[in-house]
Amino acid sequence: MSNRAETGVWVSLITYLLLSITKVGLGNGLSSQALTADGLNNVTDVLAAGGVLIGLWIARKPRDEDHPYGHSRAESISALIASFIMATIGLEVLKSGIQTAWKGEAVPPDLSAAWFALGCAGVMLAVFGYTRHLAHRTRSNALKAVSKDNLSDALVSIGAAAGIIGSQWGMPWLDPTAAVIVGLIILKTAWGIFKEMSHLLTDGFHEGDLSRYRDTMEKVKGVKSVVDLKGRMQGNEVILDAVIEVDGKLSVEESHRITEILESEMARRHQVRQTHIHVEPDRSPGSDR
């Protein structure tokens, strides 16, 4: 699965590299600050995608003495670093756009810059569809972050095109204003990725997912109740720790068989590969002890 995730990141990286070079060059040549800002946005994407690739390579390493659970969290760390890179360049784009708009130095750019920006938006929408599909199939958090960035980049290009077109109607300030909006979108995307990855790295887990897992466990024959259930992410893998109650008269072998069925059900229904289960006798009122 990690190889497929890497393929998606490579597609994004190569696309970003080509678009960033072209946008920055044409943006300067056609006097469009919005298109230049869009190109700088893609430069952040090249750096971020490169960081994600490194994270995926590290995450593939097997367990060792220092990492008994493997290296899969490197994938989330790479996405976190990518958010810092995006925020840094987003602030620079925002600062440049505000300064130009405030000083009133903007001149209307060439209209062809708008059509080029719209074409780039179409390319990024296609890449977004591809990476989103792969992220869903591989359950890769890093690739999921990349796909979100793909979508924001398509929207950024559309916004840049709108600013360029608007600047042709006697409002040259719309071009730097579009650059400011691009900077804000970059910062918003960076914050979203940072928030999600920091949540995962601090062992945060969505309560709704735990509720679904609990329902599945309590439907397994022999499980009286799920006393406690905790979850955490190890890279793109879910790890669950559960305490269940079973009939106190069951033998150790019978209790163990229930845990095996539970593990199998969690893998089949929710793709949870690691479910650690502690068994206790049923202590509910009226139960036999």
Image (cartoon, rainbow, N blue to C red):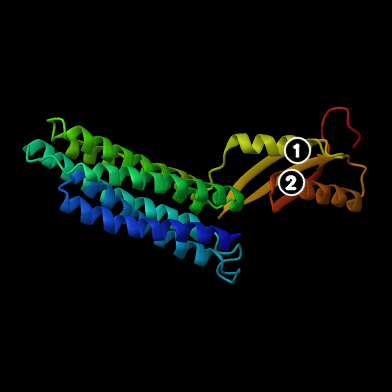
Q: Earlier in the sequence, mark 1 or mark 2?
A: 1
- What amino acid is at disc 1? Thr
Disc 1 target residue: 216
Disc 2 on helix, strand or loop?
Answer: helix
Q: Position of residue 176 (x, y in %)?
A: 17, 39
The N terminus lies in quadrant: bottom right
Q: Nearer the viewer, residue 218 or 20?
A: 20
Gap in angstroms between the C-alphas marked 1 and 2: 8 Å
- In-front residue for pair 139/30: 30
Q: Residue furthest top?
A: 286
Residue highlighted by disc 2? 266
Instruction: Give the percent coordinates (x, y) of residue 257.
Output: 87, 51
Q: Position of residue 122 (x, y in %)?
A: 40, 44
Q: Residue at x 57, y 38 (%)?
A: 206
Q: Are marks 1 and 2 in contact (CB under 8 Å)?
A: yes
Q: Amino acid at mark 2?
A: Met
For the question of whether residue 22 can be seen, the reply is: yes
Q: Position of residue 165 (x, y in %)?
A: 22, 35
Image: 32 above or below 165: below
- For residue 145, side relative to residue 191 (left or right): right
In this view of the protein, can residue 194 be seen by the observer?
A: no
Q: Quadrant of the C terminus?
A: top right
